[in-house]
Amino acid sequence: MTDLSRNALATAVLLMAACFTPAQAQSPLQPAPRAKTTPVLPAIELSPELLYKIMMAEIALQRGLPQNAAQALLEVARETRDPRVAQRATEIAWNARMLKEALEAASLWQKADPDSAQARQVVAALLVNQENLTEARVPLEQWLAADKANAARNFAQVAQLLARNNDKKAVFELLKGLARPYNDIAEVRLSVAQAAWSANDVDGALAESRAALKIKPDLELAALFHAQALSRRSNGESITFLEDFLKRYPKANDVRLTYARLLANEKRTADARKQFEILVEAAPKNPEIAMAVALLAMQTNDYDAAEKHFQGALAAGHKTPDAIWLFLGQINEERKNYDEALKWYAGITSGERYMSAQARYAGVLQKQGKLDEARKHLQSIKPGDDAQRIQLVQAEANMLREAQAYSDAYDLLGKSLEGAPESIDLLYDQAMIAEKLDKVDITERNLRKVIELQPEHAHAYNALGYTFADRNQRLPEARKLIEKALELSPQDGYIMDSLGWVLFRMGQMSEAVTQLRRAFDLRPEAEVGAHLGEVLWANGQRDEAQKIWSKFLKDNPLNDTLQGTLKRLSPALLPAAASAGK
């Protein structure tokens, strides 16, 4: 091949590249930088036929016909074995979703330039993309072997690529095999552990993360993953492991933060707060830590501490200040500092929390006795889409429900349903209001429609079953509906409460008490307490029943379920409730 012909072919390929836009040039993955070695170019003349095919590919690209361009360049790559042409054909075919042609072009590219790390990676990526893990193994091994100095980084890239495959067990087995030459690298073992986790092999995940920690005992990422895997078996095991890790590496702040959150989840509030205080002292200007401490304090109703740390997170430049403003508004609501709460909510003027802030703003106005003003506020907001319109209607209907203006709420939801007859939220909310108005036929119709539209809607099954049980009607059907709800949402305290209630209605007293105690442990709230108290009362445990009712009367004197229960069973408690509500 003469220099002139070689340069002519190069010029033609460069012209092709110049016409190929960045949007078209996306690769199957983000490859490593191309090696600086120059590939050996083929000794072949640039014939008029080759030049014609290259120019046809260019024209096809300009006309938005990448399939034609890919076919033309693939033919040139077959004839010339030029790695530049094969690379360009690969890129165009990939973006045209011509995966078979892309794989052929990439294979030609790799054979023409065997030292190209990028070519090896693209071949591997295309094989993985086509779920051909068996053939992908060799190019993946070559990819890793070509750059052993960066094995940890490259193995993480391979693991990320393989994570797209649906056969998680096969991916785990493949990664275990690929990892054998690098089993002394902690990060490689951690990548294999993560693949085991994805394959639902908890024991395998624990074994690999344990091996990673043996190689590098202070590797926080491995410790965090190991704790996560242990928590699948028991939070207690995870907590014990993290305690031991922190004794050896007390400055591991990410681990300590996870440890503190686990303690909080286990309701070990004092222990959790101690850990958060250590974190705050170690990193006083860390906004994420300040936020975590504030949320824990809010969870335990320590509003002074919550406000202090929320303000600290704001001062440290937390990435979501509007979330903090929302929490500060809620804190002031709880303190009944309503004007201050309104200021915080008013500060949220856009974004994903805007609608929540507006609903809470209206709710504060209602608490101030300004129901009409609250409704006008919601009606003045221009929704950006149907979802926001429905949110606003729900917020207004909820205020009317709390004001016991059930007919107005029912009519508002009905009017909105005319424009969105299949809105699950509106159907469900109207069903709940219809139940208050004793329109059980509407309640049943709406809830069955919700179930038809969304068969996994646990609360629709629960609400319908509870409606029947509360009226002592169709009890076998009610039980089936509630059990279906519990199957869909097995840890939901409200559904457990419904199941306990229907068991009580069916005369299964012992099972009802057990179920309601479980519900009360999860949801120690007025309605659940009213049900548990009634079942205990009927079971002869009247002192305990009255203790439970008395506990909720102070803060929930107007709760409908509690009021109705006491009127029937213990009216002597009601004067205290009435005076508390004044």
Image: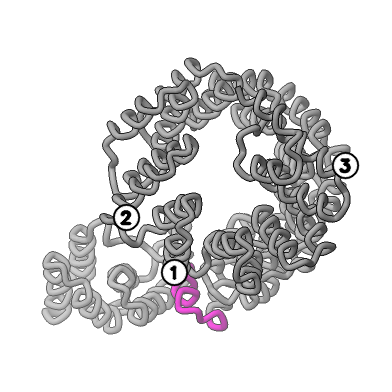
Determine which residue is flagged by label 1.
122
Label whose residue precedes the other's in the sequence (2 or 1): 1
Residue at 74%, 29% (x, y): give it.
276
Q: Is residue 134 magenta?
A: yes
Q: Amino acid at mark 1?
A: Val
Q: Amino acid at mark 3?
A: Asp
> Which one is nearer the viewer's eye here, 297 or 496?
496
For the C terminus, the image quarter is top right
Q: Is residue 165 visible?
A: yes
State which mark lies toward you, 2 or 3: 3
Q: Is residue 425 left or right of residue 144?
A: left
Is residue 411 left or right of 177 when viewed as pictured?
A: left
In the rendered view, how is the structure colored? one colour
**Circle 3 Cα neighbour tier, 10 Å, few/some/many (<14 / 14–19 / ≥20):** few
Mark 2 vs 3, N-terminal side: 2
Callout 2 amino acid: Leu
Residue 75 x %, y %? 25, 82
Q: Which residue is mark 3?
A: 543
For the record, the magenta segment spans 121-135
In which quadrant of the rendered view does residue 290 lie? top right
Q: Whole-Å distance between the Cαs marked 2 and 1?
A: 52 Å
* Residue on which the image places disc 2: 417
Helix, strand or loop at mark 2: helix
| Residue at the spot 21% in from the left edge and 71% down from the top edge | 66
Q: Earlier in the sequence, mark 1 or mark 3?
A: 1
> How many residues crowd mark 1 within 10 Å: few (<14), some (14–19), many (20+)?
many
